[in-house]
Structure formats: structure tokens, C-alpha cells
Image (tube, rainbow, N blue to C red):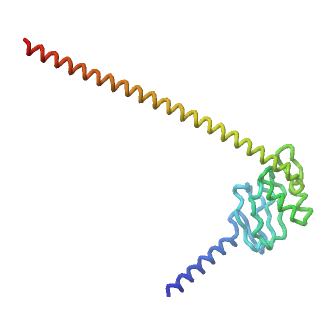
């Protein structure tokens, strides 16, 4: 009986997961295999992470997309048409997935409608025909900038740690000096009391 219940639960959960994967994204409209996410003001960050697996046509045009997340279109075996024009494609490292995907398509119209909006030296160029080495060079530049920023941050961190350590050492030395002075003062007071006692005895 217990095994039957576990099996039922697994089947229900599997059905829920499958339904979630095939659900129409809230920001889009879906009908008869057409998923329309056009003119929604979508940025790459706000783009749905998945689409129904039976999607035949996907409309992403007239948005603010700068790139497509890697693998976004791969789980759509029935996909036949995609509209990507009128977006703000940034032709740097992040565009490599879109470039590779376009190269696998057989639609010249689609390829001609996807062009770079930035950086300035790439503006107007077709994404599919970008030179891979040229795009990768922008990745290296970005990584170099990140490495420099990381080194600067590390240097600042080390300087702060050194200053804190110096402050702690100074505080400990000062505390030790005050402790010695306090002990010396107590010792002098005890010596004075002993001297007074001895003087009283002698008198």
C-alpha cells in the first residue's frame, strides 16, 4: 500500500513539473503553438527562462533584449519560426549563444534582421556573421578589467587589514603601558603605607 501511495505522489509531482514546463509564461500570450512575447519591454533579465515545449513560433521582437541566455531555445524541438528583430543586441561575449544558434538556421530573413546595436564599432553588423575571435577578444578585455578590479579590491582589503592590525597593536601596547603604570602606582602606595607603619612603630 505504501509503495502505491509513493508511486501516486511521484506521478502527480511529475505531472505538475511537466505542466509547469509547458505553461505559458505570464508575460507572453500563447495560442496554437504560437508564443507571443513581442513588444513587452522585456530585457534579458526579465525574459522567461523557458517556453512550452510544443512552441512552433516564438515572437521576441520589439523588446529590449541585449542577448539570449545560453540554451534558451534548445529544448524546443517543434520550433520553426522565431522573430528577433528590433532589439538592442550587444555584441560582446554574451551574444555568442545567439550567434551560434543563428548559424544553424536556414532563414536568411531571420539572420538579416538580427544586428548589433552596440558597441559602437559593431553597430549595424549582422550577429550571425560576427568574427568569433573578435567577439572573444571583447570577453578577454572584460575579464582583464574584472581581474584588475579584483586586484585593486584585494589591495584595498589588505591595506585596511594592515591598518586595523596596527591599531590593535598600538592599543595593546598602550594598554600594557597603562597596566604597568597602574602596578607601579599600587606598589608605590603599598611601599608608602609600609613606611608610615614603620615610622609609627619607631615613634
Q: Name the residue: 86% across, 65% down.
A: 104
- Residue 58, relative to residue 184: is it above or below? below
**Outermost residue, top direction?**
203
The x, y position of residue 168, in whole percent, is 46, 32
Query: Number of numbered discs present?
Result: 0
Q: Residue furthest bottom?
A: 1
Judge left or right: residue 174 versus residue 120: left
Q: Measured along the vertical axis of the image, is residue 169 above or below residue 153?
A: above
Residue 158 percent location from the top left of the image: 58, 36
Q: Residue 81, position in %: x, y?
A: 84, 68
Question: Which residue is painted at 79% across and 66% down in the image?
Answer: 58
Between 18 and 203, the one nearer to me in the picture? 203
| Camera-nearest residue between 118 and 143 | 143
Q: Residue at x 66, y 74 (%)?
A: 19
Which image quarter: residue 56?
bottom right
Q: How far across and how far down the image is residue 28, in percent?
A: 72, 65
As drawn, 159 above or below 20: above
Q: Nearer the viewer, residue 23 or 53?
A: 53
The quarter in which the C terminus is drawn is top left
Amino acid at each position: 500500500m505504501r509503495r502505491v501511495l509513493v508511486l501516486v505522489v511521484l506521478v502527480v509531482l511529475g505531472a505538475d513539473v511537466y505542466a509547469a514546463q509547458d505553461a505559458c509564461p505570464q508575460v507572453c500570450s500563447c495560442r496554437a503553438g504560437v508564443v507571443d512575447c513581442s513588444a513587452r519591454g522585456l530585457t534579458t533579465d526579465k525574459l522567461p527562462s523557458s517556453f512550452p515545449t510544443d512552441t512552433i513560433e516564438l515572437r521576441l521582437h520589439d523588446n529590449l533584449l541585449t542577448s539570449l541566455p545560453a540554451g534558451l531555445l534548445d529544448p524546443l524541438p517543434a520550433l520553426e519560426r522565431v522573430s528577433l528583430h528590433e532589439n538592442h543586441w550587444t555584441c560582446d561575449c554574451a551574444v555568442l549563444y545567439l550567434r551560434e544558434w543563428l548559424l544553424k538556421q536556414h532563414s536568411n530573413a531571420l539572420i538579416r534582421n538580427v544586428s548589433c546595436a552596440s558597441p559602437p564599432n559593431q553597430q549595424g553588423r549582422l550577429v550571425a556573421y560576427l568574427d568569433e575571435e573578435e567577439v572573444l577578444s571583447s570577453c578577454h578585455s572584460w575579464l582583464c578589467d574584472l581581474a584588475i578590479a579584483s586586484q585593486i579590491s584585494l589591495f584595498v582589503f589588505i591595506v585596511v587589514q594592515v591598518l586595523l592590525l596596527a591599531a590593535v597593536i598600538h592599543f595593546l601596547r598602550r594598554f600594557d603601558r597603562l597596566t604597568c603604570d597602574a602596578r607601579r602606582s599600587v606598589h608605590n602606595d603599598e611601599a608608602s603605607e609600609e613606611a608610615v607603619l614603620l615610622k609609627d612603630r619607631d615613634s
